[in-house]
Amino acid sequence: MSESQNIEYKESWRDEYLKWICGFANAQGGRIYIGINDKQEIVGVADSKRLMEDIPNKIVNYLGIVADVNLLHSNEDKEFIEIVVEPSNVPIAYHGQYHYRSGSTKQEMKGTALQQFILKKMGHSWDDTTNDSAKLDDIDRNAIDYFLRRAINAQRIAPSLNGEDTHNVLHNLRLLSEDGHLKNAAILLFGKEPLRFFPGVEFHIGRFGMNEADLIFQDVVEGNILQMADKVVALLRSKYIMKGCNVLSLWRYQKMLYAK
């Protein structure tokens, strides 16, 4: 069996391979075979007795997890080691670094990728995370009212909720934490100035010439998601949709922007 998402071969043991075990634990789990080369030939290991003690202890001490370490024998009576790593339901680090198995490679996670990975492992998503620096005053009441009108017209909510208190609307949409803090999704949907909290939250539209390097003109749309949806559609209609363009496609695009 060739190397894959769940299989890795190493000719001999090195402590740096704890990174690979870390990567398997953070992904879907897998098996590492020590004493087998990349051609899947069994070359065997030296001092298997010592390795059978060292490897399990190092996995526990450096990674905080338990893995099955099995001593196997080939038909030629060569010994090789199988390390079986189960996927972990919590993030695993090696010397403060988080590794991840993707395809047949190991990658170190950093920055945004690491943040999203940790949130996912802990059962959260980025938009469901609270933003302690945002207050209810940062929510645009006009955006709330606009949402309520469209939801009522679409028969998604009862007409009696028109004019409902901002706090209650956000609470019913599960955009507030139990202690009343705004979630990131609330700011993206209804915030007065989402860019204050999330740099780069904007929509870029451009018209190009013969290739992607030939930018004729562009527009940058800012605001919350509800505002951007209307502005983007308006710009597409007024500046970017050429005569003879399929209007039905634009209508579908607008429906997509407002989709739940």
Image: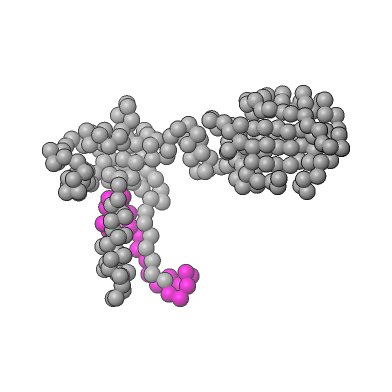
Q: Position of residue 237 (x, y in %)?
A: 27, 67
Is 24 left, or right, of 32 in this rendering? left
Which residue shows up at 38% across the image and 37% down it?
128
Which residue shows up at 39% across the image and 45% down it?
198
Between residue 92 and residue 97, name the one nearer to us: 92
The answer to whether residue 174 shows anywhere in this view is yes
Between residue 194 and residue 156, name the one nearer to us: 156
Q: Position of residue 257 (x, y in %)?
A: 31, 54
Residue 141 part of the magenta-drawn span: no
Q: Is residue 71 above or below residue 249?
A: above
Q: Position of residue 164 (x, y in %)?
A: 16, 37
Q: Is residue 200 above or below residue 26?
A: below
Q: Position of residue 16 (x, y in %)?
A: 72, 36
Is 231 left, or right, of 121 in this rendering? left
Q: Which residues are magenta?
A: 209-233
Q: Quadrant of the N terminus?
A: top right
Residue 228 part of the magenta-drawn span: yes
